[in-house]
Image (tube, helix red, strand yellow):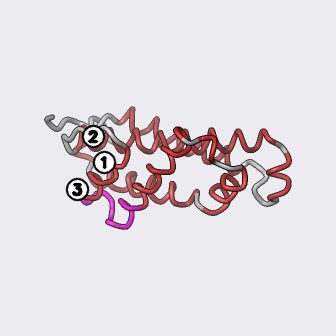
Amino acid sequence: MSPGPIEIRVVTQRLALIDELLDEIRALPLEDRAAFLADRRNIWAAESCLRRSLEALFDLGRHLVAKGLAKGVKEYKAIASELGNAGVLSAAQAELLRQMAGYRNRMVHFYHEVTPAELFEICTGHLQSIVEIQNTLRSWLKANPNRLDEEL
């Protein structure tokens, strides 16, 4: 693979989608566990928005790895490793992203094991991890405008 410009269209769409999905999660009744669990629609919304926000984050990461670093990756955990190896993410952030990859895979392949209480816990205590990685990628892109096909 040879490096090419990172497509601003892909970057802005994925960043905006992550923001939108996280806002949808934050709009759920997260201040009250009983209220959250009482309406099953909250659980389905939380699961869908969480999974899709992780997938958008990994789609963005894969694009940065493919275009910006000229490396092909097939698995989400490899995206985290490549971003860490390139210094886009710190070692701790790369490990955090690897953990997110594992959780996303669990949501997709072992969906029947993900409990409503677990979703509530993640939505109330761990959304900031997604935001942290998103902001780091955004900062790296702003610091590397020469790698973009247009200005951010």
Q: Is residue 66 magenta?
A: no
Residue linked to disc 1: 78
Going from the N terminus, do you reach mark 3 or mark 2 first?
2
Disc 2 residue crowd, few under 14, some 14–19, many 20+, Cα 10 Å: some
Dividing the picture into quadrants, the one containing residue 86 is bottom left
Mark 1: few, some, or many residues within 10 Å (few <14, many ≥20)? Answer: some
Circle 3 crowding by C-alpha within 10 Å: few under 14, some 14–19, many from 20: few
Report x, y in % for residue 4: 19, 35
- Dots 2, 1 in contact, CB < 8 A: yes
Q: Give the residue at x 85% y 53%.
A: 35
Q: Quadrant of residue 75?
A: top left
Q: In terms of depth relative to the viewer, which is nearer, 93 or 109?
A: 109
Q: Which residues are magenta?
A: 87-95
Give the CA distance from mark 3 to mark 2. 14 Å
Left or right: residue 17 versus residue 44 is left
Q: Nearer the viewer, residue 94 or 69?
A: 94
Label 3: which residue? Answer: 86
Left or right: residue 42 compared with residue 9:
right
- Residue at left 32%, top 65%? 90
Quadrant occupied by the C terminus:
top left
Amino acid type at mark 3: Ala
Q: Is residue 56 left or right of residue 50?
A: left
Amino acid identity at mark 1: Ala
Residue 66: percent from left, percent from top = 25, 38
Q: Earlier in the sequence, mark 2 or mark 1?
A: 2
Amino acid identity at mark 2:
Val
Residue designated by label 2: 73
Residue 89: say if magenta. Answer: yes
How far apart are the alpha carbons under marks 3 and 1?
12 Å
In the image, residue 120 sits, relative to residue 6, either above or below, namely below
